[in-house]
Amino acid sequence: MLSEKETLDILKKTNSLLEGHFILSSGLRSEKYLQCAQLMMHAELSELVCKSLAEKIINENLKFDMVASPAIGGIIAGYQVSRFLNVPNIFVERVDNVFQLRRGFECRNKKILIIEDVITTGKSSLECAKCLENLGGDVIGYACIVDRSSGNSDIKKIISQIKFDVPTYSPQDLPDNLKIIDPVKPGSRKF
């Protein structure tokens, strides 16, 4: 299993940890952003990180039939982790800004672990869970590569490879150093 330092070194090496003024998918602002898509560009390194996360999940002794991820950020993480857990994986995708299960995927009567790349507020993970539960799935837990929720998510237990405590701000309550930087929105969700 990778240590937090080894994981952080990989995130830095792959330019996954960015600094600037970012608009998060929740609408909050941050001076750091985790772009795990950069990690996923490097198959061998992402495999190391996802294998380590899978080992942490195994140590939790959870019982589930499949993993599911919100598109688009969680798809590769979900796929990689599912390989090491030896379970099928599916994903939900936004259609008219609402998650839907498509492509012939089924989840009825399945115990499901949600896998994400990054969890901050947990909004996408919870929307994913709601979609699957409305279709008869049973979401039993949540895991991610990076937990940056600082315990402020509605998700009470998150299994993660690494945790970051990065402050977030409302657009009306920005610190002076962010006010002078033009914000960018690197995520995939519309507000």
Image (cartoon, grey):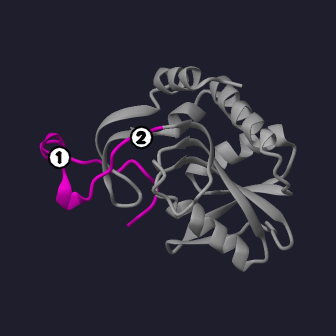
**Which residue, given by chain and number where applicable, does mark 2 sit on?**
165
- Per the rendering, the mark at residue 175 is 1
State whether residue 5 is above or below residue 115.
above
Dot 2 alpha-carbon crowd within 10 angstroms: few under 14, some 14 to 19, many 20 or more: few
User: Where does residue 69 sit, x and y in percent of width and height?
Assistant: 66, 56
Residue range of the region highlighted in magenta in the rendering: 164-191
The disc labelled 1 sits on which kind of residue? Pro
| Sequence-first tag of 2 and 1 | 2
State whether residue 110 is above or below residue 166.
below
Q: Is residue 180 magenta?
A: yes
Helix, strand, or loop for circle 2? loop
Residue at left 86%, top 72%?
109
User: Where does residue 30 sit, x and y in percent of width and height?
Assistant: 31, 46
Overall secondary structure of the magenta stretch? loop
State whether residue 105 is above or below residue 25.
below
User: Where does residue 98 sit, x and y in percent of width and height?
Assistant: 54, 74
User: Where does residue 122 sit, x and y in percent of width and height?
Assistant: 52, 59
Task: State left or right for residue 92 relative to residue 63.
Answer: left
Camera-side residue of 5 and 92: 5
The disc labelled 2 sits on which kind of residue? Asp
Foreground label between 2 and 1: 2
